[in-house]
Image (cartoon, rainbow, N blue to C red):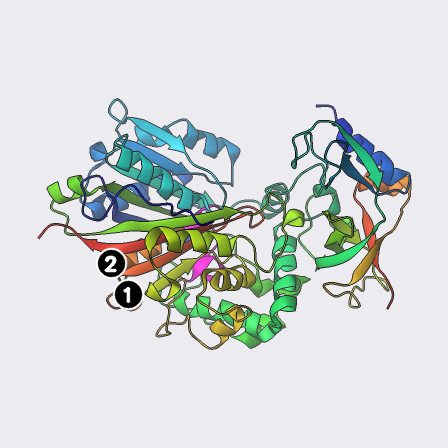
Amino acid sequence: MQTPIIVTEFRAGLSDGKLLVQLCKDCGKPNMWPRYACPHCQSENLDWQHSGGVGTLHSFCVLRQGAPEGFEEDLPYAIGVVKLDEGVQLAVRLVPSAPDDWSEYQCDDRVEFVPVSADQIEKRPCATFKRIAD
Amino acid sequence: MSEKWTLNVGPGTDNDPVFVGVGEIPTGKFPDRGFIQGLTKVAILALKDAGMVPRDIDTILLIPNLHSAADQADLIFSRMVEELGIHGTCKSSMMVHSGGSTSDNAVRTAHGLIAAGHAQNVLVLHCERWGSADLQEMITMLSKNGIPGEWELPTGIQFNAIGAMITRRYMHASGSTAEEMASVCVTLRNWANLNENAMFYTKPLTVEQILASRMVADPLHSYECPPMADGACAFVMTNTGNAKKRGISNSVRVAGSGGCVSHYCLSQEADQAVLGWPLAAERAWNQSGWGPEDADIAEIYDSYAAVTAIALEGIGIAAKGEGARWFAAGHGDPGGKLPMNTNGGLLSAGHTGVGGGTALLVEGIRQLLHRAPSKRQVEDCQRAIIGGSGGSYMDAQILLLERTKLGA
């Protein structure tokens, strides 16, 4: 099956160093993950807006073993759930503060989007965030 | 939610659905025990326990295995009807599936079929071979269940990562310590030590051992992650009129249920330290007229300590933020004020995939039928809270079960 356009456009944004959030052109609400119809008003008149890329870290973990197939070489890696200031949420990778060290991170930390290379997005098409220094 | 949502059946009425039998075989690693063999064994055990034979069964509900799609297809396409020799007479055979909460939804399905008259005698079956399956294959498979492939899979998320995020958020919100989280696992192990069918029967566990085990997904240590196991269990439901005709004097009925599907993928959950439990509980109390203080036991999904601690708080058994400390105080232990997960739960009896919740349900029915081995039978057990959750803890499901005397 061809990759759906809402997926390719979101990923193209990441490759360009931008975090896109779906915007409903009828009710004006942001949606994340992007949907085929707006879950608030069922409109299919949907577009993108650039996220400010800043939010709060709801929770995170550091996976040290038991990676899914194809992710073994990434270990250890940290995954988090970010609540963006726009009011939507997403799962992200977190940048370590020092090599393989995420000990500075805490729940409810303020975090920001980090653009990464198009090659990296090709391999791991997800957003990366880091802690905003105190 | 203010509208009262009543059950259309009452205790003692002929169409009130009741549980009349359970069956189970040991949970652990049994590579030589076949999948269909396990299902057949528990079917026969549950039927015997119910005083029935296979031809009494008109409807089979299958709780899916996850170790093999081909084996799951065998269930979908009615293999057990033939294995039990009821082809040609069985009315309906089908699968019910909502991951870890399947057992709760299978009960609702059977309950509705029986109450409406579509079914008389329903056999619900489960078998899983996770303990004997290829571990890497299961990890990869579990990184696709309850996880959107296009949005979250690229992060490398999998089941322990989901459990770890919920645990971290819960510890942050409640101020629970690593020792308090580990104490949940110790309570479960204390129960498993009374259950000969448990994977970790006669293998005591301490908080110190847990905290010394290797870190798998911060903040989860390996002894806080569910052990994948082979296992099988079954139960039989019928209607009250039929149970009376068969001379059954004690059974278990559904006093009410409540549920809430709070998300599909974890990143969309509003509060990982709360999940869907408060609304599920409100609905269950509303339907049954019970409160959390009315139960004699609780059997609540426990793939990770935090999952159960969060459920306890949402249900109102423990105060907000006090779920893990409730366990640390020994309240859920054998002899505690509310015996919890009296088979040892998923963490100590063994995680049999979709069947972990089924095993807890079967244990709850067994306790209410007063058929648990004497060393773990809770005295005068009359009411049980059963709790389940599926996928990335997408839902919170509550069944309230009560022992009911039939006839004279």
Is residue B140 in view from this perspective?
yes
Magenta range is B344-357
Amino acid residing under circle 1 = Gln
Residues tagged 2 and 1 counted as in contact (Cβ below 8 A): yes
Q: Is residue B138 left or right of residue B9?
A: right
Image quadrant containing the C terminus of chain A = bottom right
Rendering coords of residue B140 (x, y %): 64, 43
Q: Nearer the viewer, residue B279 or A2?
A: B279
Q: In the picture, which quadrant includes the N terminus of chain A?
A: top right
Q: Residue at x 86, y 37 (%)?
A: A13
Q: Is residue B349 visible?
A: no
Label 2 secondary element: loop
Residue A6 magenta-highlighted? no
Q: Which residue was labeled with disc 1?
A: B377
Please tell me whether residue B219 is drawn above or below residue B280 in the rendered image. below
The numbered mark at residue B371 is 2
Q: Chain of mark 2?
A: B
Q: Position of residue A15 (x, y in %)?
A: 88, 38
- Please say whether residue B356 is one of the residues in the magenta stretch: yes
